[in-house]
Image (spheres, rainbow, N blue to C red):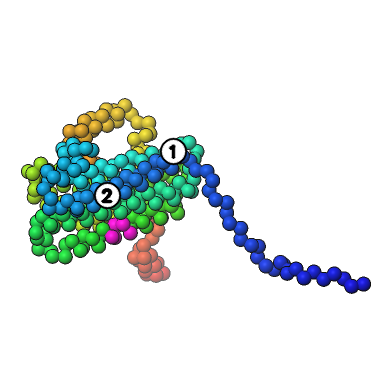
Amino acid sequence: MLKAVNHAPSTQGHRKRWKPRRPLRTISMLPTLLTLGNLMFGVAAIYYCGREMQHLGVDKSVAEALILPRIFPPALAPTFLSIAVWMIFGGMIMDTLDGRVARKTGQASNFGVQLDSLADIVSFGVAPAIMAITLIHRELFQWQAAPLGFVPFGKAAVFLAFVYVCCAALRLARFNVETTMDEASHEGFRGLPSPGAAAALITTVFLHEHLEYVGRWTRTANTLTTLMPLLTLGLGLLMVSRVRYIHAAHLLLRRRPFWHVVAILLSFVLLLMFTEQVTFVIAWTFVLSGPVAFVLRKTKEPPEETEGRETPSEETSQSLSKRQAT
């Protein structure tokens, strides 16, 4: 009898066909909305930077009549760059809440981590860099001369802003690889966090705008503009470093002694009275806290224990004495 021959191709020895993963069907609503709010604040900051350059050379009263009084009083936001600073502050509030809400409600996921980093690169990477470039180019236009006689000052500022954005992207990518979902892993950072770097950069811009609005500290404002490229580069390098930083929001939300509450209330009074100066001091104190703590740890480390160990000179002297004795 003839046997039936199976002409179907054999699958032995072949790899299994790749099956696509099931698409993401559900997401946590509140943390995702907070993260998207952070992203929208970052885009709004970039928009106001563009408005600042658009009205460059236009009468100040005409520019203020367009949009500034409708959102903030002139004392808090004298320019479009000041409004951009407030937008970044709003993004920081959203960024502080989204991760904590997700972890406290048990809704933390890898999707949220990736989305948070995408929003952070816009709000704390691209937007602060554009703010720094806008400030420098606006001041160069008004000065009609480069500071300190350095002609390619504007081009160098743009390049260092590019470096800042690249360092922020590297910092966020490394954080995604090294972080975990538990709360303990978010109590500190290795390297300056991108919101901290953005806070230092935008508070410098904020203080500069306030000093120019007051009109009594013109030389100090010009000094801040001159130092802006170097500050941008230093913040970028600190982000990709391994310097340890504490989590500022974690310190505020933990249980503390009673006098800490009184100190925070007093600091809020100073913050309301001198908003630009206090935010500048707080931001740069946080930035410098990491390198200062690093230097203190290095200086306080005990030297290597040499007790019970004989140095080479002691060994040679002892061997010579034994030979002379024999």
Residue, x 37% and y 34% (percent of image)? 253
Instruction: Give the quarter of the figure containing the N terminus.
Output: bottom right
Highlighted magenta segment, given as a residue range? 162-166
- Give whichever of 199, 143 is nearer the camera: 143
- Give whichever of 230, 212 is nearer the camera: 212
Q: Tell me residue 117's x, y (percent).
A: 40, 50
Tell me the element at label 1: helix
What distance separates the C-alpha of mark 1 from that of mark 2?
26 Å
Q: Which residue is mark 2?
A: 47
Q: Main secondary structure of the magenta part?
A: helix
* Residue 273 sits in quarter: top left
Going by the numbered disc 2, the residue's amino acid type is: Tyr
Asked whether, in this view, residue 220 is left or right of residue 34, the answer is: left
Tell me the element at label 2: helix
Asked whether, in this view, residue 154 is left or right of residue 176, the answer is: left
* Residue 8 sits in quarter: bottom right
Q: Is residue 104 above or below residue 88?
A: above
Q: Which residue is mark 1?
A: 30
Residue, x 28% and y 60% (percent of image)? 162
Residue 204 visible, this orientation: no
| Residue found at the far bottom of this picture | 2
Q: Tell me residue 208's x, y (percent).
A: 16, 47
